[in-house]
């Protein structure tokens, strides 16, 4: 439904996109992760027809937004980070305006506006000027304008920033519902637990390209677990860490001792055996499965060297350009 192939985009000497590839199927929620500056917004803006790529192309259900912007606009709902609503108009007026632009019929507009306002918990705010809504309410209002016409492709850039837990849940439920109805959703977030709640697949962007893509469980499968012990006294943790110099061990300042291991059951058995009678010094034992946070840290650290090399190459290219 949404397909990006070989996208490249430069701003001066900065390569915002550098061979960016991503496909999102109908009914799929793809969580797009990446450090600040990884190229996520540039990708979204190209999909929404707000930027043109220097190379490569995007297809939205077969339509290229660079060559058919009007057709592409009808296929995509893009909620950027910055609020794009009329501040002096009421939320209802904003929804009417955006619904009308998207071609919603007057007969259905009224009921659709009521339904979307209820879904984002803003029914009571419908007749207030948008400028009087809180920051979190404005973000939800913006999401409502994008979701109102039910576009088959949704690009949502951190829509839950500033939302309290209840409204966050309401927004996530709405996104899940739209995907269940067949929308392809690309969902940018820095808050990884949301991707579990959305049952999203994952794409990790770094330095203008996708460095990992797949289902969460596939991506997590290759990562080690952590066997974590909590000792009542620091020195016991340190002493025990010294007994395992060959393992990936970390003792913290609060009596915590962790072992990063691909075989957690074996590691735990070995640690308990070596503790022997001193096991009474341990207050808590836990085996932690790898999380999306671990995956993200692992991938971005592994690609750090490449990114540093790329930055060095860009800087050399800039110097060469200068010399010429
Ligand atoms: N209009 C522009 N002019 C100059 N540089 C730009 C422009 N737009 C983006 N960039 C640069 O391109 C790179 C990618 O930016 P982009 O906004 O796509 O990243 P991002 O992944 O969305 O970051 P964030 O998580 O902070 O939103 C950054 O180095 C940014 O400074």
Image (spheres, rainbow, N blue to C red):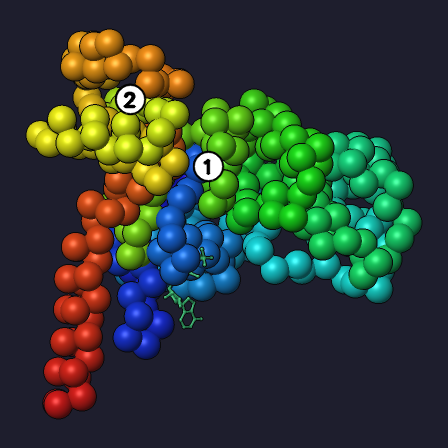
Among the 4 quarters of the image, the one containing residue 241: top left
Q: Secondary structure at mark 2?
A: strand
Looking at the rendering, the quadrant in which ligand 1 lies is bottom left
In the drawing, does residue 311 fall left or right of residue 163?
left
Instruction: Specify whether tag 1 is near ligand 1 (CB below 8 Å).
Output: no
Residue located at (20% from left, 79% from top):
318
Residue 24 image offset from top left, x and y in percent: 40, 35
Looking at the image, residue 71 lies above or below residue 27:
below
In the drawing, does residue 275 fall left or right of residue 246?
right
Report the number of numbered marks.
2
Precedes in sequence: disc 1 or disc 2 = 1
Q: What residue did someone put label 2 on? A: 227
Residue located at (30% from left, 52% from top):
206
Looking at the image, residue 254 lies above or below residue 210:
above
Residue 8 image offset from top left, x and y in percent: 29, 60
Q: Nearer the viewer, residue 215 or 242?
A: 242
Residue 122 image offset from top left, x and y in percent: 81, 40
Which numbered dot is residue 192?
1
Looking at the image, residue 22 lies above or below residue 43:
above
Q: Nearer the viewer, residue 104 or 220?
A: 220
Q: CA distance from mark 1 to mark 2?
A: 22 Å
Residue 184 shows in this picture: no
């Amino acid at each position: 439904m949404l397909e990006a192939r070989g996208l490249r985009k430069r701003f001066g000497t900065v390569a915002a996109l550098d061979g960016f590839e991503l496909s999102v199927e109908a009914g799929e929620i793809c969580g797009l992760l990446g450090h600040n500056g990884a190229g996520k917004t540039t990708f979204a803006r190209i999909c929404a027809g707000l930027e043109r790529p220097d190379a490569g192309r995007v297809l939205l259900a077969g339509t290229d937004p660079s060559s058919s912007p009007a057709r592409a606009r009808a296929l995509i709902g893009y909620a950027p980070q910055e609020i794009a609503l009329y501040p002096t108009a009421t939320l209802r007026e904003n929804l009417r305006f955006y619904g009308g632009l998207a071609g919603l019929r007057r007969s259905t507009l009224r009921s659709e506006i009521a339904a979307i306002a209820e879904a984002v918990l803003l029914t009571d705010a419908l007749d207030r000027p948008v400028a009087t809504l809180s920051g979190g309410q404005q973000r939800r209002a913006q999401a409502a304008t994008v979701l109102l016409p039910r576009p088959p492709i949704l690009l949502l850039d951190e829509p839950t920033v500033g939302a309290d837990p209840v409204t966050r849940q309401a927004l996530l439920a709405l996104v899940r519902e739209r995907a269940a109805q067949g929308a392809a959703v690309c969902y940018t977030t820095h808050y990884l637990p949301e991707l579990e709640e959305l049952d999203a697949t994952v794409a990790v962007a770094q330095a203008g390209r996708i460095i990992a893509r797949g289902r969460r469980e596939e991506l997590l499968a290759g990562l080690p677990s952590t066997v974590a012990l909590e000792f009542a006294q620091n020195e016991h943790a340190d002493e025990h860490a010294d007994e395992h110099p060959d393992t990936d061990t970390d003792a913290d300042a609060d009596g915590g001792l962790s072992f990063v291991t691909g075989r957690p059951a074996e590691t735990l058995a070995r640690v308990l055996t070596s503790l022997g009678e001193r096991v009474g010094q341990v207050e808590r034992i836990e085996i932690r499965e790898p999380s999306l946070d671990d995956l993200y840290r692992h991938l971005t650290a592994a690609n750090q060297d490449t990114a540093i090399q790329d930055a060095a190459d860009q800087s050399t290219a800039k110097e060469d350009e200068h010399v010429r």
